[in-house]
Each structure stands twice: as C-alpha cells, then as structure tokens.
Amino acid sequence: MIRTRLMTGLSALALAVTPMTGALAEDADGNIVVGFATAETGFMQAYDKPAQDAAMIRIEEINAAGGLLGKQIKVVNADTKTDRAEGAKAGLSVLDAGADLVVVSCDYDFGAPAALTAESSGKVSFFLCAESIKAGVQGVGPHSFSASVLAAVQGATMAQWAHEKKGARDFYRLLDTSYVYNKGICDGFDWMLPTLADANLAGEDVFKNDDASIAAQISRIKALPKEPDAIMLCTMMPGAVSAIKQIRAAGINSMILNGSAVDGSYWLSAVPDLSDFYVPVQGSVYGDDPNPDVNAFNALYKEKTGSDPATQYTYPGYVMIDVWAKAVERAGSIDAGAVVAELEKMDGEPTLFGPRTFTPELHHQNKARYLIAEVKDGKPGIVDEWTISEPVPMEALMK
C-alpha cells in the first residue's frame, strides 16, 4: 500500500542516514548499504541531487519504521564529477564500501559506467531517473533498473491526450536531434499517432539544442495550408526555451506539447505569458497534485532541503528506494538474484508517484499514469491526468 503518513520532521535524518566514505566497510556489519555513485559536482548535479534527496527521505522513513529486514540502511557516496571515467571509479568506490544497491546518475550515458561496474559485481543498480531503454536490461544487464518512465511514454501520452481531450487532429513534429532522450519522445509520438482516428502528421522538421535560431523551421510551419492544432516539440533544456520563445514570437498559436524535461516554472520568465503549453509529469511540484500525500511530500522535501522540488525529476528517487525496499522485504534477502526476481513480479505496484511494473524483458516503464501540466498566462498547474491505452511496444522503444 502507498505510504499515507509522511513524517513531519527530518531531525533524525543526519543520524539515521549519514553519508560515509570507504571507512564504512567496518560499520556495515549488520546493516544494509546503499551506495550513491552520482554527480555531486558538474552539470549532472542539477539532475542527480534532487532525486537523491528524495531517496534519502524514503531511506529515513524506512529506518525510522524499524529498518529493512530488521536492519538499518546506511549510505555511502562517491562523486562521479559528471564524468564517465569517474563514474566507473565511483561505482567501484561504493562497492568497495559494501554497497548492496548501487544508485547511479539520472542520465544513461553518465550513469552507465557505474551501473556496469555494479553489474559485473552481480549487484543491483538503479538509475535515479534515466528515461532511455538502455538504462536497464538492454544497455547494462539483468540487475539494472530505472526509477523513471520512458521518454517514449511521454510522447505517446501527449499525442493521445491532445487528440482525445483537446480535439487535436493536425500535428507537427519538431525534433531536437541533440540527445537520445529527445528522440525517445518523438519515437513514442510516432508510434501513437497512426493509432488515432483522423490524426494527421502535417509536417516534420529537426533542429539542434544549441541552435540560436530556428527561423527556417518556423517559416516551414507558417507555410502550411493551416496552422497545426499541435506541435509535438521533442526537446529539453536549455534549447527548449529558445524554441518555444521563437515559435510564439512568430505568431504561431498552436498548442505546444513536450516531454517531462520541460517541467517546472524556473524558466517561464523567459517566455512571458506563455499559454497552451503542456507536459506530462509524474507528480506536481506546484502544490496542486490530486494526491494530498504528494503535496505533503513536497512540504517535507522543502523542510529537508530548504527549497521546493523544482521539477518532477525529484520524485523517481523516492520511488526507486520504495520499490527496491519492497522487493528486499518480499525476497527476505538482499541477494541480487532474489531481489531482481521480486522486482520483476511487480505489476502496477502502487507508489506515491504512480504504479510501477517491471518484467524480465523491461526494467523500465512503457506505460504510466501521467498528470498533465498546463502553462496558461505564464502560470503552470495540473489540468488532467492520462494513461495511454496500451504499453509502448518493444519495437518502438528500440528504434
């Protein structure tokens, strides 16, 4: 069952879950060890730290309730420095410190070196919030999982929701080719669109995240016989802001759809009074989540960190510890094979941020309940929720 009572204070956190170094090897006897091989420096820190903070909250809750298998969870840390070579070293460091679970960076490229190190040692690894299918069986191995939802599910969700709930029929596909994540969004969109009655791809184009101008792409949109109902914008920060600003400055009023990477209000001042912009989120950082426990979590997170969650990418860290701990309890062991077997039995497993399913073939989510966040007159908020009618198939995920 979803935990419905969240702690109102974190005064015990520093004592119950203290980040430690390799010296923990002596202290680990009788404790279960979680090793974070994540970015404490470099640009990936902005993604890793919020999810890691959320993970620490769930660890503290478990410890306060008596621990896992009657043992306390201890934490060891190693900084990947947002560097792939350092990632492998960080993975070895936490394994040397006794890690039973290795938690790795949010992004597949930066998290994979540590995850591969865990795999070679026969240990379970969890990506904090990577959304590529490679962050799991396909890219690392049978002991590796991700706590977030595949990018393809985001694209598929936005296409079906816009068609069914907003009456969109003519779509324009605009892909930022700079990152695999962006391609994943459009892959999901491409799979879903032909299944939608009377839906039409009015056109498609590409750009790069660091392009200073997308004037040529905008000209081709404006040259269409009529303005599309929706633009499926498959991109991420920082280029997303520039693209959105230019689209609206050109007088194009089509609704703009994007993936979860553009969640948050921190960038909205750059596009004043933006409206008709929509993204899927696992939980709301705006204080209006329909689940009051999520809003309570946000308050707890602020108490711990001094700031509100900036984006929905905070939440997978909490989910990751939650599902792993459930699997350990059901296995009655921290043995990696036994824990993996229990994780792979999870089918719609309830968590604070939506159900999770894992199978031997897929250690990721190819279907998920999403909240739909709308930006209207420059202000974001939740307006709906949506679950795609069927999972995104493997052939679409592996394009």
Image (cartoon, rainbow, N blue to C red):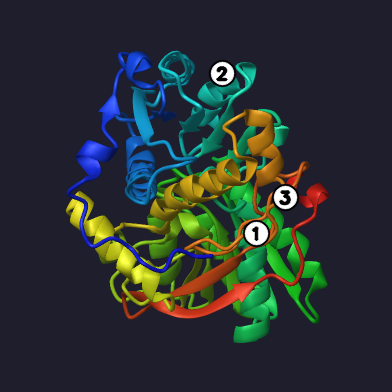
Residue neighbourhood size for the residue with mark 2, other residues' Cα within 10 Å, grouped as few (<14), some (14–19), many (≥20): many
Q: Is residue 308 visible?
A: no
Q: Which residue is mark 1?
A: 153
Which residue lies at the image location 72% right of the left edge and 34% below the top edge? 138
Q: Quadrant of the N terminus?
A: bottom right
Q: Is residue 362 above or below residue 351?
A: above
Residue neighbourhood size for the residue with mark 3, other residues' Cα within 10 Å, grouped as few (<14), some (14–19), many (≥20): some
Q: Return the x and y of residue 351 as percentages of the image width and height.
A: 52, 61
Spatial distance from mark 3 to mark 1, Cα to Cα? Answer: 21 Å
Label 3 vs label 1, nearer the camera: 3
Q: Secondary structure at mark 2?
A: helix
Residue neighbourhood size for the residue with mark 1, other residues' Cα within 10 Å, grouped as few (<14), some (14–19), many (≥20): many
| CB-based contact (under 8 Å), mark 3 and mark 1 | no
Q: Secondary structure at mark 1?
A: helix
Q: Nearer the viewer, residue 104 or 220?
A: 104
Which residue lies at the image location 50% right of the left edge and 37% below the top edge? 107
Query: Mark 2 belongs to which amino acid?
Result: Thr
Q: Which mark is residue 117?
A: 2
N-terminal of the pair, mark 2 or mark 1, is 2
